[in-house]
Image: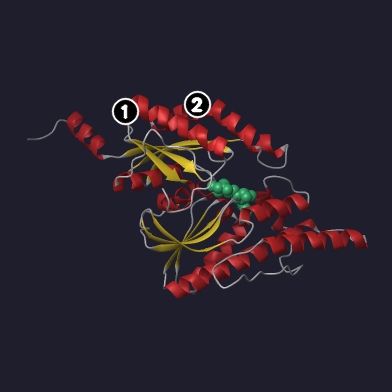
């Protein structure tokens, strides 16, 4: 029997899995609707950057308060932009860690309230799993296994993505995260917060070979990183210039620092791909939007016949589409969170 159009539509609708993702782990209040894990129907991000710029960094208390003010509106907008109602949503996915505890709690409480009121399943998502999953949005053909470098404000992880939701961390930073180093150096050279995008921009006017900053080697693990020595080297250079009464070329410092970070990230990532035999390599996290890093990784991968994947910059920095994508794969695996879901500020990748 042939189905009427409305019946067919209903059936198709039932087959589609729509995830409402919510993200509030740091200074972006975000919500998104994603269809079948890969198609972004809406992506609303309300950034608080302007507020925190006044203080030179994220002020946790202000972040929590702003999330509370904005979250309902952001969720409503995400549903409206997607052209759906809560009824159409299959499940609610929310970042529950890692991040700022007060900020995380706002998203978790919102997601629990919506899931409870609308009688929908709730899926807690790891923020870094979200960053990695951002690669699935624009690379429909990408499937695990692959290697991924996660570089954000709080994390620098070299990860083997064994399967959806299955990770092995093979390298990590021993001190500062890559994004943290960008932010600290930006502050030292007077660029202010947020440092990453500002260094990226200013570096385009500078010479990356002007100053040789050290490329730190750390301990036994060839895949670990260390950025605090590099940060100190930049500070020492600035102090030495001041003592000698020499003027500092900000663009050259930015470009040389960025080159030192990029060289180390590329070297370790390519070493891992070669040792593990990976032919697919992805980058993720806020620092993955850095233009010099993207260009250097692209070139290094091409040289080794490795396929390089990277999300568009809007999906590299914090967003809720990536949380909905990760939530989709967790939902399909049967992951469900209870009403006791709580914020876990130090949640480790792979832990629940
Ligand atoms: O992933 P993300 O938005 O938030 C965290 O989970 O931490 O990453 C934020 C970090 C900040 O340290 C910011 O300075 C850095 O990413 N970042 C960049 C760029 N855009 C953002 N770093 C270098 N170049 C960029 N273009
Ligand atoms: Zn992030």
Q: Position of residue 283 (x, y in %)?
A: 50, 58
User: Local crowd at mark 2 within 10 Å, few (<14), some, or many (≥20)?
Assistant: some
Q: Quadrant of residue 252?
A: bottom right
Residue 206 is situated, as x and y percent measured from the top left of the image, at 74, 61
Q: In the visual, does 325 lie left or right of 242?
A: left
What crowding class fits label 1: few (fewer than 14 Cα within 10 Å), some (14-19), or many (20 or more)? few
Q: Residue at x 69, y 60 (%)?
A: 228
Q: Nearer the viewer, mark 1 or mark 2?
A: 1
Q: Residue at x 31, y 31 (%)?
A: 88
In the visual, does 203 lie left or right of 22?
Answer: right
Total marks drawn? 2
As measured in the structure, the alpha-carbon distance from the residue carrying label 1 to the one carrying label 2 is 21 Å
Question: Answer yes or no: do the residues labelled 1 and 2 have beta carbons within 8 Å?
Answer: no
Residue that mark 1 sits on: 119
Q: Quadrant of residue 267?
A: bottom right
- Tell me the element at label 2: helix
Of the numbered discs 1 and 2, the one sitting upstream in the chain is 2
The coloring applied to the image is secondary structure
Q: Is residue 279 left or right of residue 204?
A: left
> Which mark identifies residue 73?
2
- Judging depth in this view, the residue of 319 and 120 nearest the camera is 120
- Using the image, determine if residue 332 lies above or below residue 219: above
Q: Secondary structure at mark 1?
A: loop
Residue shown at the point (35%, 44%) measured from the top left: 328
């Amino acid at each position: 029997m042939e189905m009427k159009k409305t019946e067919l539509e209903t059936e198709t609708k039932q087959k589609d899995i729509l995830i409402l993702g919510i993200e509030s782990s740091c200074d972006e209040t975000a919500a998104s609707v994603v269809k079948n894990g890969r198609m972004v129907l809406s992506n609303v991000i309300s950034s608080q950057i302007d507020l925190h710029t006044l203080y030179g960094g994220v002020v946790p208390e202000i972040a929590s308060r702003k999330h509370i003010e904005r979250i309902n509106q952001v969720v409503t907008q995400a549903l409206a932009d997607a052209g759906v109602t809560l009824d159409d949503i299959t499940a609610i996915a929310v970042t529950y860690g890692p991040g700022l505890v007060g900020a995380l709690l706002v998203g978790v409480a919102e997601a629990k309230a919506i899931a409870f009121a609308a009688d929908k399943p709730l899926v807690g998502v790891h923020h870094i799993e979200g960053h990695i999953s951002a690669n699935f949005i624009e690379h429909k053909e990408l499937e695990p296994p692959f290697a991924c470098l996660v570089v954000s404000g709080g994390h620098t992880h070299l990860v083997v993505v064994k399967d959806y939701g299955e990770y092995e961390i093979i390298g990590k930073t021993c001190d500062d995260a890559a994004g943290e180093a960008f932010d600290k150096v930006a502050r030292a050279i007077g660029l202010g917060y947020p440092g990453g995008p500002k260094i990226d921009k200013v570096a385009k006017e500078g010479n990356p070979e002007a100053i040789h900053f050290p490329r730190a080697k750390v301990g036994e693990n060839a895949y670990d990183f260390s950025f605090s020595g590099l940060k100190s080297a930049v500070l020492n250079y600035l102090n030495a210039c001041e003592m000698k009464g020499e003027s500092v070329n900000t663009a050259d410092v930015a470009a040389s620092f960025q080159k030192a970070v990029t060289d180390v990230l590329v070297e370790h990532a390519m070493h891992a791909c070669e040792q593990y035999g990976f032919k697919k390599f992805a980058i993720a996290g806020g620092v993955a939007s850095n233009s010099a890093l993207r260009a250097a990784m692209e070139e290094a991968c091409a040289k080794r016949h490795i396929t390089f994947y990277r999300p568009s910059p809007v999906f590299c920095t914090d967003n809720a589409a990536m949380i909905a994508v990760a939530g989709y794969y967790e939902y399909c695996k049967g992951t469900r969170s209870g009403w006791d879901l709580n914020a876990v500020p130090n949640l480790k990748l792979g832990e629940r």
